[in-house]
Image: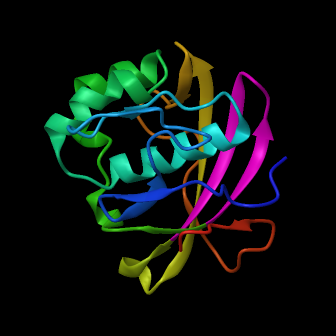
């Protein structure tokens, strides 16, 4: 398991600090139009993909969301639902969430459960825990969504960062 945040280079994706292209954990492909993919098949790679997804859903750009769904969402009913209604993925209420910590709750070479904690200014700087399920498929980490195009585990407000690792770019 991980004990520290990645020591990668950082760049802003919207307002979220994410690992820069060709960092040790990926993404190894970043395109001008917002596509970020090809993460390492490691716990750090899964973490990078989960943070990238948080940045993705904080946008309200439906065209961008439509284009990125096949790249970042695992095949299945969740991806089908997202493709049918990409605007349902967007959560602009997040505004510009600032990632403050994470935990790798489960990890193997084919599945990861990454808990991203962000500070939500819209909720008085509350700490929000967002468990993100990822599956290694099609040569990359893909986000697993339920049949309503939502993460299987809901986000919740937490009181402290106990059990989480501070995000180095906060």
User: Dividing the picture into quarters, in which one does residue 129 lie?
Assistant: bottom right
Which of 129 and 36 lies nearest the eye of the viewer? 36
Which of 165 and 91 lies nearest the eye of the viewer? 165
Residue located at (62% from left, 67% from top): 167
63 left or right of 37 in image: left
Outermost bottom residue? 124
Camera sees residue 85: no
Camera sees residue 120: yes
Q: Which residues are magenta?
A: 101-118
Residue located at (22% from left, 41% from top): 87
The percent coordinates of residue 74 (x first, y second) are 49, 22
Q: How many marks?
A: 0
- How would you classify the magenta stretch by its main secondary structure? strand
Residue located at (29% from left, 48% from top): 90
Residue located at (65% from left, 58% from top): 7
The percent coordinates of residue 68 (x first, y second) are 30, 30
The percent coordinates of residue 15 (x first, y second) are 33, 65
Q: Is 142 in the magenta?
A: no
The percent coordinates of residue 127 (x first, y second) are 57, 75
User: Dividing the picture into quarters, in which one does residue 16 lie?
Assistant: bottom left
Q: Is 116 in the magenta?
A: yes
31 left or right of 167 in image: left
Which of 154 and 167 lies nearest the eye of the viewer? 167
Which of 82 and 165 lies nearest the eye of the viewer? 165
């Amino acid at each position: 398991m991980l004990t520290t945040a990645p020591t990668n280079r950082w760049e802003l994706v919207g307002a979220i600090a994410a690992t820069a292209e060709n960092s040790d954990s990926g993404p190894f492909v970043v395109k001008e139009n917002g596509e970020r993919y090809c993460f390492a098949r490691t716990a750090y790679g899964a973490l990078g993909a989960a943070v990238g997804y948080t940045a993705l859903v904080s946008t309200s750009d439906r065209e961008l969301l439509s284009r990125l769904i096949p790249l970042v969402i695992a095949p299945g009913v969740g991806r089908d639902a997202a493709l049918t209604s990409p605007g349902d993925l967007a959560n602009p209420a997040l505004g510009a969430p600032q990632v403050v910590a994470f935990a790798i709750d489960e990890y193997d070479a084919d599945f990861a459960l990454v808990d991203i904690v962000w500070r939500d200014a819209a909720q008085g700087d509350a700490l929000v825990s967002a468990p993100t399920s990822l599956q290694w498929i099609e040569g990359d980490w893909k986000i697993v969504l339920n049949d309503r195009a939502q993460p299987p585990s809901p986000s919740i407000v937490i009181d402290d960062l106990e059990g989480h690792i501070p995000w180095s770019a906060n």
